[in-house]
């Protein structure tokens, strides 16, 4: 099992909390695609954290829309 440190994942995000949020949302996106169900496939969260740590994920922070505004 690979271990990701907060410093490692926050290199390509503003902070460690945002980096975990980005990785979790990316893992949800990966879950929508068909996968190879072999035994050697990595877990989606591991794959998302690897791609975030290597800088392969591009993201934008969008301001939250206020209801009724």
Image (cartoon, grey):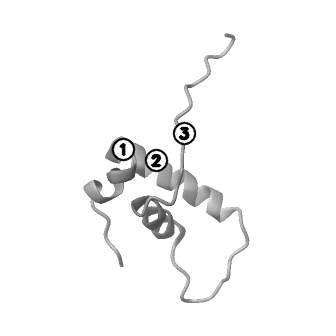
Tell me if label 1 and label 2 are in contact, CB under 8 Å. Answer: yes
Which residue is depicted at the point 55% across and 51% down?
25
Q: Which residue, given by chain and number where applicable, does mark 3 sit on?
A: 60
Q: CA distance from mark 3 to mark 1?
A: 15 Å
> Mark 2, residues whose alpha carbon is within 10 Å: few (<14), some, or many (≥20)?
few
Looking at the image, which is closer to me, 1 or 48? Answer: 48
Total marks in image: 3
Q: Earlier in the sequence, mark 3 or mark 1?
A: 1
Label 2, on which residue? 21
Q: Quadrant of residue 18?
A: top left
Whether tag 3 and tag 2 are in contact, CB under 8 A, the answer is: no
Q: Is residue 68 left or right of residue 25?
A: right
Quarter of the image holding residue 33? bottom right
Q: Is residue 51 above or below residue 23?
A: below
The residue shown at (52%, 56%) is 57
Which image quarter holds the C terminus? top right
Q: Quadrant of the N terminus?
A: bottom left
Mark 3 or mark 2: whose residue is earlier in sequence: 2
Where residue 36 appears, as percent x and y from the top left, is 67, 82
Mark 1 and mark 3 in contact (Cβ < 8 Å)?
no
Instruction: Categorize mark 3 by other alpha carbons within 10 Å: few (<14), some (14-19), many (20+).
Output: few
Find numbered disc 1 in the image and state the secondary structure of the residue it sits on.
Answer: helix
The residue that label 1 is drawn on is 17
Q: Nearer the viewer, residue 12 or 69?
A: 12
* SS for dot 3: loop
In the picture, measured across the screen, residue 20 lies left or right of residue 48, that is: left
Eye-nearest disc, 3 or 1? 3
Residue found at x 50% / y 63%: 48
């Amino acid at each position: 099992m690979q271990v990701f440190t907060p410093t490692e994942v926050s290199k390509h995000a503003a902070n460690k909390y945002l980096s975990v949020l980005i990785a979790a949302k990316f893992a949800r996106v990966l879950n929508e695609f068909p996968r190879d169900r072999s035994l050697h496939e990595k877990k989606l969260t591991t794959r998302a954290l690897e791609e975030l740590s290597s800088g392969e994920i591009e993201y934008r922070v969008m301001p939250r829309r206020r209801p009724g505004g």
